[in-house]
Amino acid sequence: ISSGSGSAISIGMNLKAEELQARTQRFALAVIKFCDGVPRVPVITQYLDQLLDSAGATDSNYRATCRAKSPDDFISKIANAAEEADESKGWLEVLVKSGHATMEQAGALIKEADELTAIFVTSRKTAQRHKAERERLKQQAKDTTRRRRRTR
C-alpha cells in the first residue's frame, strides 16, 4: 500500500498514533480502489460491500481509539478496530478464493489487514497489562495504608 500525503495532524496525539491513523486511512482508501476494480456481479456485490464497510470501520474505530476517554474505553475501541481489520482480511481472502480477485490484486491488502490486526491486538494486550498493573499498585497502596493505620 503506497503512503499518502496531505494528512492532517491532530494536536495532542503522539507520532505513532498519528502514523497509524494515516495508515488505517490509506488502507480504507486502497480497499475502495481495489473494490472499484472488481467487477460488480450480483453474487459478489454483498462481499464487496462488506469489505468496504469493514475497511472503513477499521479506520473509524482506530480514530475513535485515539480519542478514548479511559483505559477501558481504549481497550474496547482498539478491540473493535482489530475485529474490523481481521474481518477485512477475511473478505479479501473470500474474494481471492472465489476467483473474483487474484492474490496479485489483493495480496498487499491482505498483508496490511493482517498487520493492522496484529498491531491492534498487541496494543489491546499492552493496555490490559498496564491497567492490571495500575490496579495492582492501587490495591498495594490501599493495603499499605491499612497496615499503617493498624500499627498506630
Image (cartoon, rainbow, N blue to C red):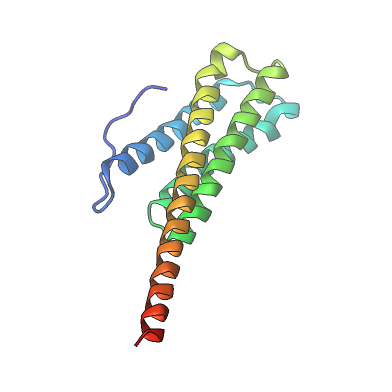
Q: Residue furthest right?
A: 43
Estimate the x, y position of residue 68 in percent, counting from the top left. 41, 58
Estimate the x, y position of residue 96 in percent, counting from the top left. 66, 18
> Considering the image in quadrants, where does the N terminus appear?
top left
Q: Residue furthest bottom?
A: 152
Write the residue at 45% across / 31% down. Answer: 27
Left or right: 9, with 148 as reference point: left
* Residue 102 figure quarter: top right
Estimate the x, y position of residue 13 in percent, counting from the top left. 28, 50
Write the residue at 65% across / 30% down. Answer: 91
Left or right: 68, with 12 as reference point: right
Toward the viewer: 125 or 108?
Answer: 125
Above or below, 113 against 108 in this view is: below
* Residue 19 figure quarter: top left
* Residue 17 figure quarter: top left
Toward the viewer: 104 or 41?
Answer: 104
Above or below, 107 against 5 in this view is: above
Q: Number of marks in the image?
A: 0
Estimate the x, y position of residue 55 in percent, counting from the top left. 53, 37
Left or right: 93, with 33 as reference point: right
> Considering the image in quadrants, where does the C terminus appear?
bottom left
Write the residue at 54% across / 41% down. Answer: 82
Toward the viewer: 24 or 7?
Answer: 24
